[in-house]
């Protein structure tokens, strides 16, 4: 038994392998952190997309009802657009100057990815001459249905929180 303990104490193979084991552990932990960061980033983007779609859905449902009832309706809603998100009503990407031909479209952009949608309502800014852009942050939006000189009904979006 005494020979075993002397041999065990003199054997330094485990001590020689310790730095290699630490390096392997650090690499494994680093790889896990990278994978976890990607998963968290994807989860945050999914949450931003869900929140943005909920905001658009709320605006859409009100705008469609107002558009079908005719001019003269006014609705005020509170929305909080997530940071890094921009929503544009009445245009499609790379074509903001083609209003009113794209007034029934909207899109939002999250981290460089654009999602386009179509509405049964036509959107405009307060001066009835362009699209409406909703930037990140809290907003008090007023939706108003008006008829233009050609008889077409537009939903004017106006941000009361910017006054």
Image (tube, rainbow, N blue to C red):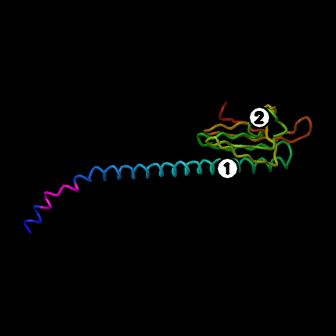
- Quadrant occupied by the C terminus: top right
Magenta span dominant secondary structure? helix
Residue carrying label 2: 96
Answer left or right for 133 relative to 11: right
Membership of 104 in magenta stretch: no
> Which numbered tag is attached to residue 53?
1
Q: Residues within 10 Å of mark 2 (few under 14, many from 20)?
A: some
Vertical arrangement, residue 146 with respect to residue 58, above or below: above
Which residue extends farthest left?
2
Q: Residue at x 81, y 46 (%)?
A: 121
Classify residue 113 as left or right of residue 10.
right
Residue 6, percent across and down? 10, 61
Q: Earlier in the sequence, mark 1 or mark 2?
A: 1
Q: Residue at x 83, y 47 (%)?
A: 67
Q: Which region of the structure is painted magenta? A: 7-14
| Residue 31 as seen in the image, left or right of residue 97 | left
> Which residue is more in the foreground, 78 or 105?
105
Of 7 and 110, the residue lying toward us: 7
Front-lying residue, 76 or 6: 6
């Amino acid at each position: 038994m005494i020979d075993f303990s002397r041999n065990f104490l003199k054997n330094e193979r485990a001590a020689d392998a310790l730095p290699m084991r630490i390096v392997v552990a650090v690499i494994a932990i680093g790889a896990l952190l990278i994978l976890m960061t990607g998963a968290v980033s994807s989860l945050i983007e999914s949450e931003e997309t869900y929140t943005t779609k909920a905001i658009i859905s709320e605006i859409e449902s009100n705008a469609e009802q107002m558009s079908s009832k005719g001019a003269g309706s006014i609705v005020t809603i509170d929305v909080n657009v997530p940071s890094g998100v921009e929503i544009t009503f009445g245009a499609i990407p790379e074509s903001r100057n083609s209003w009113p031909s794209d007034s029934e479209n909207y899109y939002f952009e999250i981290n460089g990815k654009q999602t386009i949608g179509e509405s049964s309502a036509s959107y405009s800014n307060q001066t009835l001459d362009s699209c409406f852009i909703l930037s990140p942050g809290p907003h008090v939006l007023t939706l108003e249905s008006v008829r233009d000189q050609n008889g077409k009904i537009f939903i004017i979006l106006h941000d009361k929180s910017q006054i």
